[in-house]
Image (spheres, rainbow, N blue to C red):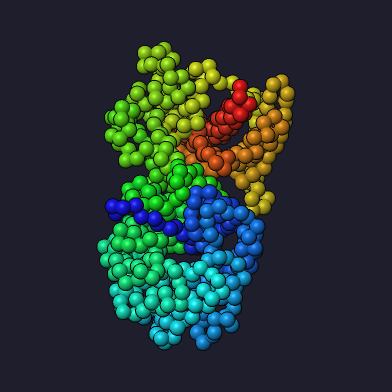
Amino acid sequence: MTETQTITLLDSTLRDGAQGEQISFSVQDKVHIVQALDELGIQFIEAGNPGSNPKDLEFFREIQKIPLANTKVCAFGSTRRKGIAPEDDGNLQSLLAANTGTVVFFGKTSVFQVERILRAELEENLAMIRETAAFLKGQGRGVIFDAEHFFDAFKENPDYALRCLEAAQEGGAETLVLCDTRGGCLPGEIGRITRLAAERFDSCAEIGVHTHNDCGLGVANSLAAVEAGARHVQGTLLGFGERTGNANLSTIIANLELKMNASCLPAGHLERLTSIVRQVAEIANITLDSGMPYVGHNAFAHKAGMHIDAVLKDPESYEHIVPETVGNDRVILVSEAAGRAAVLEKIRKFDPLITKDSPVASEILKTIKDLEHSGYQFEGAEGSFELLVRKALKRYRPFFKLHYYKTIGEKPRLDDYLCSFAQLKIEVNGQLEVTAGEGDGPVHALDVALRRALERFYPAVSHIRLTDYKVRVLDSQSATAAKVRVLIESSDGAESWSTVGVSSDIMEASWLALVDSIEYYLIYDFERQLGASGQ
């Protein structure tokens, strides 16, 4: 693409994405995701099928109360049913009752699908598409037509597939979306077929694309369609959806804006991409893939010493874009492979005047090597590493003192969720607090008890949530006496951080990582408050 093209986006996280395994949204979850996508600048949000369940109907009532700056919420449904006039079709009436300005409806375009699955005459299917579009248009709605199985349909019978698009356009659909419903096409096929459709309909309708990731090509196929003339792209922001998922819209957005000279977000909104993606992951209660392009934690992470040295001299040596462009950060992983330059770079975050010859730098490097020798690993535990540096620089103070903790396990379980109990005693500024917690395992119970004890002194800990917990045995030869490394990932809903603990006692290792996690958060919360007060 040479001249800048404007591409409209439709996010289907709340409809197609909700069909992914272990994805379940409450009405409030859906409202929060709409608000996040609106903040990003997505033009359309396909929010569900109001004719399929009461929860979607409730959502459409609730979302009417929320002011949105950039996005249009769309109801989704199918064509009218066979032998029923549009005005008598209950599903179409539900689409109107959702009261959205734009409606997305799908119809079959494959001869095989029409005859074998829908069991309708080919002409009747065309009439269903045309009349549905005309009915919705006549009710004052914007109309987007999803041409289901279009690419397979075109390879099977191109004339009929195109006639289905023509029927939708004649009925008043403004956007004709070509769907790779089974996700089995290759980029060359997508590009060739999209180009033919765009050449035929470009003067009277916008051509769109909707791809799935069954061959791992959802993003590539979407970009191939844009190169061939599509001006509307559908996907889910994080890529999750039915089977192997939908095209990852966050990756598509970054590629369109940064690689293809296309405009798809309001000016200045691209730098919000990473934070919005992580926010949606938090609402969806999933762990974001650290290797996700552009927005993943490791998207700009460097570990090898040679790479780090080069990146510190000139980031373009190993980074294809500036991380901040999409709201992400460069990560220099601390390990035995990283070398002195990597550690110094992270230390300078706290004191830019420190050099490789500074005594404190040598002290920190020695501490890291000693801890790694004993089983620690800091490349995935930046929170613990930062606390280590703060201690060496005398920029750390403990937020509490532990007097004791103990955990108890119950077998058989008392119920489906509770099997462990924890009790602890801590001291904060001379004040003692004794609390207990119960949970699904001893670490969970200890986490509950510790946060309960601290909330009286530090209310902000109520925002912390443990999102991942990993244990690795470091010396399998020692059997149950082996050291273990525990890695904990925590989040406050906006940011995530990881901490580590090592011990031959799994509970002690977990405690060390848990304490680091909470102290890391409290330090930043304290510094944020100081900054807000201007001190």
The residue at 47%/22% (across/down) is: 350
Image quadrant where residue 421 sits: top right
Q: Judge by depth and name the residue closer to the eye, 379 or 262.
A: 262
Relative to residue 6, is residue 104 depicted above or below? Answer: below
Q: Position of residue 423 (x, y in %)?
A: 68, 35
Whether residue 55 is visible here, answered yes or no, is no
Q: Is residue 12 left or right of residue 355?
A: right
Q: Is residue 144 left or right of residue 139?
A: left
Whether residue 325 is visible here, answered yes or no, is yes
The residue at 61%/54% (across/down) is: 67
Q: Judge by depth and name the residue closer to the eye, 9 or 454.
A: 9
Q: Judge by depth and name the residue closer to the eye, 436 or 37.
A: 37
Relative to residue 67, is residue 432 depicted above or below? Answer: above
Total labels: the figure holds: 0
The residue at 51%/68% (across/down) is: 142
Q: Position of residue 416 (x, y in %)?
A: 64, 53
Where, quadrant-wise, is the N terminus in this rendering? bottom left
Q: Position of residue 80 (x, y in %)?
A: 52, 79
Relative to residue 502, is residue 142 depicted above or below? Answer: below
Q: Judge by depth and name the residue closer to the eye, 16 or 475.
A: 16
Q: Position of residue 525 (x, y in %)?
A: 60, 31
Where, quadrant-wise, is the C terminus in this rendering? top right
The residue at 34%/59% (across/down) is: 226
